[in-house]
Amino acid sequence: MPKTKTSARVSEIKEKKTAKEEVSSSGVSLKIKLKAYDHKVIDASCRQIIEIALRAGVEVAGPIPLPTEIHKYTVNRSSFIHKDSREQFEMRIHKRLIEILTSNQRFIGALRDLTLPTGVEIEVKTT
């Protein structure tokens, strides 16, 4: 018996649903971006996140060091007399990227409960 258009369409929709279920069962991939002024603090935070991921049985890639942002500021030492005398300051922002290839609910819950040291900014994106 030849397939009609509607039965072909129904089977196509079922195939798409099963494909979506397979993707959702394997988990969502995450990109975790960390920023901090101190490189020791950011490395310790990365170690914490990777330990949590390994305990949860999640595939991890990283930490990947991203280029350090350097902001340089030049300030006059004195306002009038010593105009040529200046001080230079710089502020470094260290960045790391951790990719979670497959995640699960256990890892996401542990990540939500994670307390990072002061001065570490975390940004989580789903892909």
Image (spheres, helix red, strand yellow):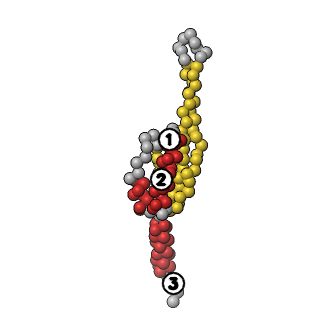
Mark 1 crowdedness (10 Å alpha carbons): few <14, some 14-19, many ≥20: many
How far, Cα to Cα, is label 3 from label 2? 52 Å
Residue 103 visible in the displayed image = no
Residue 124 x %, y %: 47, 51
Looking at this view, name the residue that lies furthest to the right: 84
Q: Which residue is mark 1?
A: 36
| Residue at 53%, 14% in the rendered image | 79
Which element type, helix, strand or loop, lies under badge 1?
strand
Q: Nearer the viewer, residue 22 or 38?
A: 38
The CA span between labels 1 and 3 is 61 Å
Distance between the alpha carbons at the discs numbered 2 and 1: 15 Å
Residue bearing mark 3: 3
Say which amino acid is labelled 2: Ile
- Compared to residue 96, the image places residue 27 above or below, namely below
Q: Amino acid at mark 1?
A: Ala
Residue to which mark 2 is pinned: 49
Amino acid tagged 3: Lys
SS of the residue at dot 2?
helix
Quadrant in which residue 72 is drawn: top right
| Disc nearer the start of the sequence (3/2) | 3
Q: Position of residue 127 (x, y in %)?
A: 51, 57
Q: Residue at x 39, y 57 (%)?
A: 109
Looking at the image, which is closer to me, 10 or 105?
A: 105
Position of residue 32 measured from the top left corner of the image (x, y, whole percent): 50, 51
Between 29 and 77, the one lying in front of the other is 77
Marks 1, 3: nearer the viewer: 1
Would you say the residues marked 1 and 3 are in contact, meaning their CB atoms lie under 8 Å apart?
no
Instruction: State the image quarter where residue 71 is shown.
Output: top right
